[in-house]
Image (cartoon, rainbow, N blue to C red):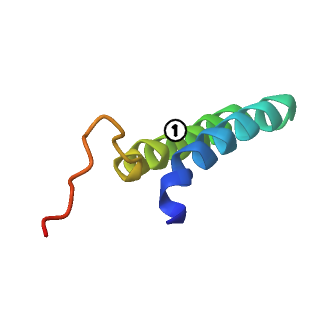
């Protein structure tokens, strides 16, 4: 059941990667930072399928 939270975790990870990576000043740092951020966003988009859809009515069990 942890998969439903992975989208939020990857979005938070993307923000942390961008914040820390763009503060560091080393050669090719921007490319590496944006590359990791894009990969993290792809994972976040992939795990959105595990977020439950609350708009669907819950089916009642038949007796």
Nearest the eye: 8 or 51? 51
Q: Quadrant of residue 61?
A: bottom left
Residue linked to disc 1: 38
Residue farthest front in this picture: 63
Nearest the eye: 21 or 44? 44
Where does the image place residue 60, in percent across and percent down from the top left? Answer: 21, 56
Where does the image place residue 55, in percent across and percent down from the top left? Answer: 30, 34
Q: Residue at x 86, y 30 (%)?
A: 23
**Quick one: quadrant of the C terminus?**
bottom left
Where does the image place residue 2, in percent across and percent down from the top left? Answer: 54, 63
Q: Residue at x 72, y 40 (%)?
A: 17
Where does the image place residue 15, in percent across and percent down from the top left? Answer: 70, 34
Relative to 49, is 30 above or below? Answer: above
Residue farthest bottom in this picture: 63
Nearest the eye: 26 or 62? 62
Is residue 58 left or right of 14 when viewed as pictured? Answer: left
Relative to 36, is 2 above or below? Answer: below
């Amino acid at each position: 059941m942890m998969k439903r939270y992975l989208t939020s975790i990857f979005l938070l990870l993307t923000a942390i990667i961008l914040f820390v990576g763009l503060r560091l000043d080393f050669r090719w740092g921007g490319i590496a930072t944006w590359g990791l951020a894009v990969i993290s966003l792809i994972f976040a988009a992939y795990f959105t399928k595990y977020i439950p859809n609350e708009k669907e009515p819950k089916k009642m069990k038949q007796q």
